[in-house]
């Protein structure tokens, strides 16, 4: 082991070392708690170096009281343990307050001196000012931090190539740009990945820096990514020289510019294509050299605006001077947005002045060409004459809100104006507005008899008449084929609206002269709704006017009605009924009643007619007359009709099994069902599911169905007959009865309406009608069912005419299946 110096010798040597090195010296007598500070140390602490009272000794507080608060605890934690560890050496850096009030950084070295018995009696050491070093270190730290932040912000990968050792520091971002994890620090990791076509230029650039250097450089080259793709890099750098002026390091960064290079290439291709397209598109071309402020205008550009002289060079303001004043701010903003990089391409439509004074619409397109820093240096593009397109768009916009036949506003525009009017009238004292709807009475007859072309002429004539009667601020619109709508703004009350409506109706009713000299007089039914009833939207107001109009039609036409709460109540009731009806089938509220059809010869049961009933949970039994028409209107009749046919067939199958297979079932079929594409398939499925003989299922259709779509009806009826199912013509004689139906349509039987049966057996002249129908049916080999038989006289009369079947209250009212089964065991009806 090395010799340990005696404590007093060690102390003297510290003192001599400090004095010879110019460092401050300190000596702390632990036992006496006195601290000797050399003049240099006292100067560091801001004490008077010449004040050497008691030989330069003082209290340790002379030192500790001037230590920076953040360092004091650390200094004490270093010195206190030394009092128990002789011969231990230490070094610590801390701050003290100097005489200027600033902080001075000190490096304090020292050792603990023992008394030979192991007890520490003195701490002795030196102190030196390291403030300049600390400040340099802080500046370096800030500089490195700024460099790191700048590198992170630019997304660049940094490198530092030590030319003496030929080793390179690659920052993590450098590796990340290539999709690699950090590897070795040799140049081959870089240069081996460079594209062969670019390597020679990169190597030459780097070699030039290594040999001379001193000036910044940048070069673009391709390098292979870890995934195999080639990425474009922008490499920047500078050689750092040593004291002899020789390059010692090569420091710089590289950034991925692939997106920019791809965009430049695409732009080049696009410009090439654009130039070719412009030649074929007959567009005017322009080319603006931004730094010089000059714009080249092609001959076609000048011709488009009627300017003489062919191609010419001017300024951008020469062009802007021709732009419509209202469009110029938007054009300037579009140019500025593109030049600043806000949008990739300029595309803007403006109006410009032709040399003749005319106004043209043009589409201006352009793109900026930028320098490596992204600043726009040049901008070029085209100008296309789009005047014809703009006029077409304006016409389309007009057509979108106007009727093509009459030129009047259409439903959309009327609804918009009604909404605007409602929005303007929110206070109770605002004058109300009125909506009037007119529907031409029997206009279909005009089209059918005189042709649709003449019908169009009539509509145009009426539109002109109504428009001539329109007040300023009002709107008259054609909202459907033969329906007109009127918005009257600022009417006093419903009486004033009625007066105006009657005046317009009288205008409609003025005679229209026909080509042959005759006169045509049309009337209209009208409905009025007033805004003072508290409408929030146009649709509600038009709906109520429509309800009033339909009431006018139902009351005999050629009249005007004002909407009131009773109409609304009926409409709401219909709406509630519709909503309930949609749920009725799913909730098993619909049921079938059955009315026996008897053989009049012996009054035995031959079959049944299935009649639908609705057992509403709150309103009780609802008559079919109250919900079947609604089901027709809403389309629910298709679902309900299929259910009724299936239910009736399944019930018939049970009765045929228990009471005889000769029973048949008649099911009423609506016109909407009969014309449904799925009707034949539905009948086929019912027969398959129930297993009943096809001939025991009879479908009853009305005469009106045959008038709706005769051609389609006969095809559908024949397909059903081909399944073996019978067809019966219901209510024969009450509709559009024609003998031609009876041989054109494949029906098996006729039903005589109760209106003709009610007078039978009483000597009423109506007796002749069933007599004639029966004679006709007999000659055509058709069965006949007389309905509505209510007494034995009617039954006897029809029996005398050899009518085969009958039904009515005389035999049995419609009843549920359970009650009907009690009748099936009887030999005849009515029960005696």
Image (spheres, rainbow, N blue to C red):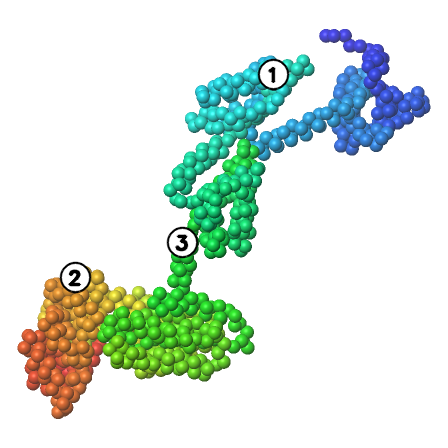
Q: Position of residue 574 (x, y in %)?
A: 35, 74
Direction from residue 98 to residue 369 in the image, left or right: left
Please name whichever residue, 319 or 505, is drawn nearer the observer in this view of the structure: 319
Please name whichever residue, 150 or 582, is drawn nearer the observer in this view of the structure: 150
Neighbourhood count class around disc 2 (C-alpha, 10 Å): few under 14, some 14–19, many 20 upward:
some
The image's mark for residue 389 is 3
Determine the CA span between mark 1 and mark 2: 100 Å
Disc 1 or 2, which lies upstream in sequence?
1
Disc 3 or 1, which lies upstream in sequence?
1
Neighbourhood count class around disc 1 (C-alpha, 10 Å): few under 14, some 14–19, many 20 upward:
few
Would you identify the image quadrant in which residue 464 lies? Answer: bottom left
Do labels 1 and 2 touch, CB within 8 Å?
no
Disc 2 or 3, which lies upstream in sequence?
3
* Marks 3, 1: nearer the viewer: 3
Please name whichever residue, 317 or 290, is drawn nearer the observer in this view of the structure: 317
The image's mark for residue 684 is 2
Provide the secondary structure element on which disc 3 rests: helix
| Pointer 1 residue | 212
Provide the secondary structure element on which disc 1 rests: loop
Residue at 23%, 75% (x, y): give it: 449
Do labels 3 and 1 touch, CB within 8 Å?
no
Please name whichever residue, 273 or 94, is drawn nearer the observer in this view of the structure: 273
* Marks 1, 2: nearer the viewer: 1
């Amino acid at each position: 082991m090395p010799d340990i110096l005696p404590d007093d010798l060690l102390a003297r040597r510290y003192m001599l070392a400090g004095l010879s090195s110019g460092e401050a010296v300190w000596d702390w007598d632990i036992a006496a708690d006195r601290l000797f500070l050399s003049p240099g140390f006292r100067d560091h602490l801001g004490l008077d170096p010449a004040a050497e009272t008691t030989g330069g000794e003082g209290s340790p507080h002379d030192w500790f009281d001037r230590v920076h608060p953040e360092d004091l605890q650390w200094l004490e934690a270093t010195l206190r343990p030394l009092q128990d560890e002789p011969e231990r050496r230490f070094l610590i850096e801390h701050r003290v307050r100097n005489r200027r009030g600033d902080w001075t950084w000190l490096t304090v070295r020292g050792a603990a001196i023992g008394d030979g018995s192991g007890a520490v009696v003195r701490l002795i050491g030196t102190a030196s000012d390291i403030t300049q070093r600390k400040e340099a270190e802080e500046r370096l730290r800030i500089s490195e931090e700024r460099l790191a932040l700048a590198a992170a912000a630019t997304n660049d990968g940094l490198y530092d190539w030590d030319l003496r050792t030929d080793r390179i520091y690659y920052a993590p971002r450098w590796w990340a740009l290539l999709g690699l994890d950090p590897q070795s620090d040799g140049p081959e990791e870089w240069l081996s990945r460079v594209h062969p076509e670019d390597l020679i230029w990169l190597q030459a650039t780097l070699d030039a820096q290594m040999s001379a250097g001193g000036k910044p450089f940048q070069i673009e080259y391709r390098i292979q990514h870890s995934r195999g793709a080639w990425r474009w890099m922008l490499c920047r750098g500078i050689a750092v020289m040593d004291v002899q002026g020789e390059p010692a390091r090569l420091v710089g960064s590289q950034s991925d510019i692939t997106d920019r290079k791809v965009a430049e290439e695409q732009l080049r291709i696009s410009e090439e294509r654009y130039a070719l397209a412009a030649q074929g598109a007959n567009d005017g071309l322009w080319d603006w050299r931004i730094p010089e402020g000059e714009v080249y205008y092609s001959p076609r550009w000048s011709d488009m605006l009627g300017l003489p002289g062919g191609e010419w060079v001017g300024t951008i303001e020469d062009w802007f001077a021709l732009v419509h004043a209202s469009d110029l701010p938007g054009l300037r903003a579009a140019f500025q947005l593109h030049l600043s990089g806000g949008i990739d391409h300029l595309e803007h439509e403006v109006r410009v002045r032709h040399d003749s004074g005319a106004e043209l619409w043009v589409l201006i397109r352009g793109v900026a060409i930028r320098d490596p820093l992204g600043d726009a240096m040049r901008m070029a593009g085209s100008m296309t004459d789009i005047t014809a397109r703009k006029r077409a768009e304006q016409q389309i916009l007009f057509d979108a809100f106007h009727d093509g036949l009459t030129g009047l506003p259409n439903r959309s525009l009327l609804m918009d104006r009604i909404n605007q009017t409602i929005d303007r009238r929110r206070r109770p004292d605002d004058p109300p507005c009125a909506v009037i709807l007119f529907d031409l009475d029997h206009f279909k007859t005009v089209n059918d008899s005189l042709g649709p072309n003449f019908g169009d002429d009539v509509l145009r004539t009426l539109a002109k008449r109504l428009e001539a009667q329109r007040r300023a601020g009002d709107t008259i619109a054609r909202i459907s084929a033969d329906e007109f709508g009127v918005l009257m703004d600022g009417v006093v009350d419903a009486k004033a609206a009625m007066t105006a409506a009657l005046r317009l109706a009288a205008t409609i009713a003025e005679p229209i002269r026909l080509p042959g000299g005759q006169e045509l007089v049309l009337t209209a039914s009208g409905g009025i709704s007033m805004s003072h009833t508290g409408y929030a939207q146009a649709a509600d107001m038009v709906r109520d006017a429509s309800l009033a109009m339909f009431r006018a039609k139902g009351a005999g036409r050629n009249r005007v009605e004002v909407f009131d709460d009773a109409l609304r109540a009926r409409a709401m009731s219909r709406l509630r009924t519709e909503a309930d009806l949609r749920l009725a089938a799913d909730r098993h509220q619909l049921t079938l009643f059955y009315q026996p059809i008897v053989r009049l010869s012996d009054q035995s049961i031959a079959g049944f007619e299935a009649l639908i009933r609705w057992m509403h949970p709150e309103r009780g039994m609802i008559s079919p007359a109250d919900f079947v028409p609604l089901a027709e209107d809403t389309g629910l009749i298709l679902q309900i009709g299929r259910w009724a046919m299936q239910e009736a067939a399944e019930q018939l199958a049970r009765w045929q099994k228990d009471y005889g297979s000769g029973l048949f079932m008649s099911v009423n079929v609506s016109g909407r069902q009969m014309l449904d594409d799925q009707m034949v398939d539905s009948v086929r499925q019912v027969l398959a599911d129930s297993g009943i003989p096809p001939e025991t299922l009879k479908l009853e259709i009305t005469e009106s169905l045959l008038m709706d779509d005769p051609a389609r009806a006969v095809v559908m009826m024949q397909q059903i007959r081909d399944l073996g199912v019978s067809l019966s013509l219901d209510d024969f004689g009450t509709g559009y009865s024609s003998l031609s139906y009876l041989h054109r349509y494949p029906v098996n039987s006729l039903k005589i309406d109760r209106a003709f049966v009610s007078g039978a057996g009483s000597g009423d002249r109506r007796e002749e009608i069933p007599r004639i129908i029966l004679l006709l049916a007999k000659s055509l080999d058709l069965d006949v069912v007389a309905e509505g038989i209510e007494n034995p006289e009617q039954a006897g009369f029809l029996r005398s005419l050899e009518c085969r079947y009958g039904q009515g209250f005389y035999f049995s009212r419609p009843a549920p299946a359970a009650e009907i089964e009690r009748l099936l065991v009887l030999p005849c009806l009515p029960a005696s």
